[in-house]
Amino acid sequence: MKNIILAGFDGRNNPARTVTEKAKLPCTKLILPNDKEKAAELLLETMDKTKAVCVVILGQKPCIKDKIAVEPTAERCGNVLHTSLDVTITAEKLKANGYNAYISKGCGNSYCNHVYYACLESGVNCIFLHIPKMKNISDINALTKAVEGYIGELGSVPSVL
């Protein structure tokens, strides 16, 4: 896998951290601190250092159960940035890898959005995937497998690599 980063937020019992750590992939795995400025800074530094061509960021969305929300945009001060990846194909590939997925209507307004915006602003291909809180995940291994499968297929997603 060419210079792909899988990033998840830190935190006790945080599924984003768990999936990032469990994923068996030949890519850079990065745990982001729960400080939006430091997280964005660390992600950008790691992207530069690894010469990343694609970033997959995981965060948790409390209101979903056993599905992944694919985030098409991030917003800051009224400016909206869109991912260069095809979100429809992303959702389809996650489903094909065994996990329900849908295209979301917004990345939120705090940590997830802030880090996603910084990544999109860099110009590197990136996608943000919101996953459920741990209590809303029936099978963490199935979720991890879907994320691994998606990342393994990134070369077939338009606008990547």
Image (tube, rainbow, N blue to C red):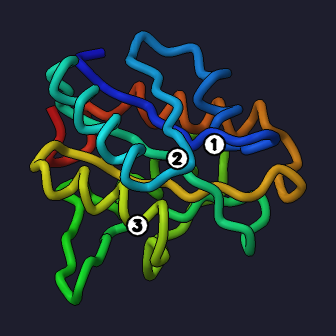
For this orientation, the residue located farthest to the bottom is 78
Q: Can you give x and y, in whole percent of width and height, for residue 42 in the image? A: 34, 35
- In which quadrant is the N terminus drawn? top left
Horizontal relation, residue 34 to residue 36: left or right: right
In the image, residue 96 lies at what x, y percent?
55, 44
From mark 1 to mark 3, how far is it between C-alphas? Answer: 15 Å
**Does 100 appear above or below 21?**
below
- The amino acid sitting under disc 3 is Asn
Which is more toward the observer, 46 or 35?
Answer: 35
**Label 1: which residue?**
16
Q: Which residue is disc 3 drawn over?
A: 113
**SS at badge 3:** helix
Q: CA–CA distance between discs 2 and 3?
A: 11 Å
Which dot marks residue 101? Answer: none
Name above or below for residue 145 compared with residue 61. Answer: above
Mark 2 and 3 residues: CB-CB less than 8 Å, in contact? no
The answer to whether the residue labelled 2 contacts the one labelled 1, judged by CB atoms less than 8 Å apart, is yes
Quarter the C terminus occupies = top left
Above or below 89: residue 41? above
Looking at the rendered image, the disc whose residue lies closer to the viewer, 2 or 3, is 3
Q: Amino acid at mark 2?
A: Leu
Please name the residue shown 35% across and 51% down the image.
Answer: 127
Disc 2/disc 1 C-alpha distance (Å): 5 Å
Residue holding disc 2: 58
Q: Residues within 10 Å of mark 1 (few under 14, many from 20)?
A: many
What residue occupies the far top of the structure in this picture?
Answer: 26
